[in-house]
Image: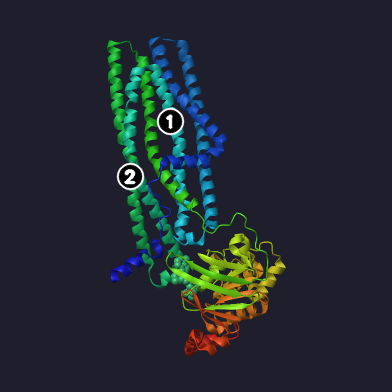
């Protein structure tokens, strides 16, 4: 039993990975085609320029053996003095041309690969921002960060660079092989016979290379998740003296990832002996055959030297091609993970003829709604509820009874499995997503502030709002006075997550943001539960005065805050077990009455409640 508990904990949120980013062994060809078609081909002009530059590099490389042959045959043997004056400047011109072409080829290649990275990152970021909440919750956010940052870099390093490298080196190989066959077809056959043998040997490495890279990327993703979690939870980490354990946990992951990286390194290094071994045999055979022909046949020293120059020059691009093959697999593996995120099918989508939700007063209706986050585990079961416009409704019930889920469905974060949710008589599934969400303003238990100024945070989602409107919203949220007392007033930077403000201040800024949005529906997910009595009283007062006419749904554990609600909905296991006004429910003596009594028997709850008894 103990073991299973510790297993669960070590996996926990830290180990979450649905496997969505770890496709089976990727079809390298298909992935490369997609990468080329979608990201490389649109820059065809640049590619054309790069190919021309690479062709010049290959052509000038192929010309060098001929120049060597001419030097040996006509200058040394033929004593051609005129050529002696001509050849060196010609070599300088050829080499100069080669280096200029190489310079442009490199710039084009660098731009192309970085462009692909930029495109992929932009697309991923956008896709993640629009992704379903359910998908985003399927893995730690650190893993998504790692895919955007790390996996995409591997696509760049391996896929696009190796792709251009393959073109460049491939052209050189073609140039040199053509030159060799031109010079001596038999010698050329001897040297190039090694090429197909090497190809077969390299293919065998493919599976190993894929696994190693996949494991490395997963490890880096886990490390990213760990780091994000440790930093976010740093106050808890320190207060529990867990710094050393957190560091040790990260170190274990780093060491495991290092082992996977070393497999990749060994795979890459293994291409050396394969190409070198085969290259050595080919050159030895060429020397023997060439030497034999030199002694017994008609092969001149110049022809032999020219040929051997070509054979030696061939060695470098062939070696590069061999290691690029491994890099290509690495890049394809990373690209497959990136594409898995890009291809994730959204479940919350708009119908083809979706229309904007007509602005109304915020009446909400649940019609026989059933919903489960996971198949077979129903959270709402045949749930029907009518919330008239402008009313204040409190959702109460035990933890896990489905209160937040009701809000998730109003915001269309998820769709019901059965039944309908209507806002002002319109099925929200038939409306556009943006207009549905515009109908509500959400205030969560844990207020979310961005690393921006106070005014930037209040204006979030209402960027066009005037300064006067911002101030009016801040006043309605009882925030104006403390904002004015901040060092730079509305221009004060709030720090990461609003870390430079108190919990109550953050909540009031978040409330001002919700007020500024001017939505007819306000969803309050226990927004005051973490506040001190004074902050809570201020927010309650603001709620009472500023929200007249709006539909307010509040989730509250402390029942003192819901006494004035028009309707109290008591949930249990996804069903409404009681519904009515406070006094009616107390008089009925059912679940609510018992919950209420238990809270007021409890000394703490009673004391906390006393200050806010005039709540919603
Ligand atoms: N994203 C999710 N994926 C899977 N299950 C979930 C998810 N969110 C909630 N649940 C489950 O759905 C049930 C209802 O959760 P919900 O958050 O709606 O309850 P709640 O009444 O708001 O609880 P609390 O008062 O503790 O916030 C719970 O059993 C919870 O474990």
- Sequence-earlier tag: 2 or 1: 1
Residue at x-position 33% and y-position 13% = 299
- What secondary structure is marked by label 2? helix
Q: How is the image coloured?
A: rainbow
User: Which residue is disc 2 drawn over?
Assistant: 208
In the figure, 16 relative to 404: above or below? above
- Which quadrant, please, contains the N terminus? bottom left
Which is in the foreground here, disc 2 or disc 1?
2
**CA distance for labels 2 and 1:** 24 Å
Residue 60 seen in the figure = yes
Nearest the viewer among 132 and 220 is 132
Density class for disc 1 (Cα within 10 Å; few <14, some 14-19, many ≥20) is some
Residue 404 disc label: none
- Which quadrant, please, contains the C terminus? bottom right
Nearest the viewer among 224 and 493 is 224
Residue 504 position by quadrant: bottom right
Could you tell me residue 272's position as x and y percent?
32, 36
Q: Are marks 2 and 1 in contact (CB under 8 Å)?
A: no
User: Which residue is disc 1 drawn over?
Assistant: 170
Residue 530 is left or right of residue 22, and the answer is right
In the figure, 255 relative to 465: above or below? above
Residue 505 seen in the figure = no
């Amino acid at each position: 039993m103990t073991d299973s508990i510790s297993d669960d904990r070590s996996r926990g949120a830290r180990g979450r990975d649905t496997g969505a980013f770890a496709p089976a062994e990727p079809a390298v060809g298909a992935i490369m085609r997609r990468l080329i078609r979608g990201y490389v081909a649109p820059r065809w002009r640049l590619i054309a320029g790069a190919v021309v530059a690479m062709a010049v590099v290959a052509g000038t490389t192929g010309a060098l053996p001929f120049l060597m042959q001419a030097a040996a045959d006509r200058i040394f043997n033929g004593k051609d003095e005129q050529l002696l004056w001509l050849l060196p400047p010609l070599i300088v011109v050829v080499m100069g041309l080669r280096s200029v072409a190489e310079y442009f080829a490199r710039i084009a290649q660098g731009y192309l690969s970085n462009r692909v990275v930029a495109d992929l990152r932009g697309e991923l970021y956008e896709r993640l921002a629009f992704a379903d909440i359910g998908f985003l919750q399927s893995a730690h956010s650190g893993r998504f960060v790692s895919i955007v940052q790390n996996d995409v870099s591997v696509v760049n390093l391996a896929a696009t660079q190796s792709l251009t490298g393959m073109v460049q080196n491939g052209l050189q190989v073609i140039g040199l092989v053509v030159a060799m066959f031109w010079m001596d077809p038999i010698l050329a056959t001897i040297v190039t016979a090694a090429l197909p043998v090497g190809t077969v040997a390299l293919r065998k490495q493919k599976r190993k290379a894929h696994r190693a890279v996949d494991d490395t990327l997963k490890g880096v993703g886990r490390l990213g998740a760990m780091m994000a979690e440790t930093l976010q939870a740093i106050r808890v980490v320190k207060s529990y003296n867990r710094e050393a354990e957190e560091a040790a946990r990260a170190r274990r992951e780093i060491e495991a990832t290092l082992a996977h990286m070393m497999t990749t390194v060994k795979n890459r290094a293994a291409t050396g002996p394969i190409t070198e071994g085969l290259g050595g045999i080919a050159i030895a055979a060429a020397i023997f055959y060439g030497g034999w022909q030199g002694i017994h046949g008609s092969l001149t020293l110049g022809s032999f030297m020219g040929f051997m120059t070509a054979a030696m020059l061939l060695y470098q691009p062939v070696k590069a091609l061999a290691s690029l093959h491994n890099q290509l697999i690495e890049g394809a593996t990373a690209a497959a993970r990136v594409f898995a995120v890009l291809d994730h099918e959204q479940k919350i989508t708009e119908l083809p003829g979706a229309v904007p939700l007509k602005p109304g007063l915020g009446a909400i209706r649940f019609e026989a709604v059933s919903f489960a986050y996971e198949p077979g585990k129903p959270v709402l079961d045949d749930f029907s509820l009518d919330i008239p416009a402008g009313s204040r409704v409190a959702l109460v019930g035990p933890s896990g009874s489905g209160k937040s889920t009701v809000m998730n469905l109003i915001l269309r974060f998820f769709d019901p499995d059965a039944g309908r949710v209507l806002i002002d008589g319109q099925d929200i599934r038939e409306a556009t997503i943006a207009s549905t969400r515009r109908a509500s303003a959400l205030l969560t238990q844990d207020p979310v502030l961005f690393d921006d100024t106070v005014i930037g945070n209040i204006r979030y989602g209402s960027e066009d709002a005037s300064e006067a409107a911002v101030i009016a919203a801040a006043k309605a949220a009882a925030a104006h006075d403390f904002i004015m007392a901040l060092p730079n007033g509305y221009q004060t930077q709030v720090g990461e997550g609003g870390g430079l403000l108190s919990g109550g201040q953050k909540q009031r800024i978040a409330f001002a943001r919700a007020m500024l949005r001017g939505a007819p529906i306000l969803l309050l997910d226990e927004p005051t539960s973490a506040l001190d009595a004074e902050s809570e009283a201020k927010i309650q007062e603001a709620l009472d005065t500023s929200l007249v006419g709006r539909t307010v749904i509040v989730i509250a554990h402390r029942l003192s805050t819901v006494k004035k609600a028009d309707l109290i909905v008591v949930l249990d296991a996804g069903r409404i077990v009681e519904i009515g006004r406070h006094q009616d429910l107390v008089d009925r003596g059912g679940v609510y009455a018992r919950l209420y009594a238990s809270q007021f028997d409890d000394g703490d709850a009673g004391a906390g409640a006393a200050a806010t008894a005039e709540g919603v």
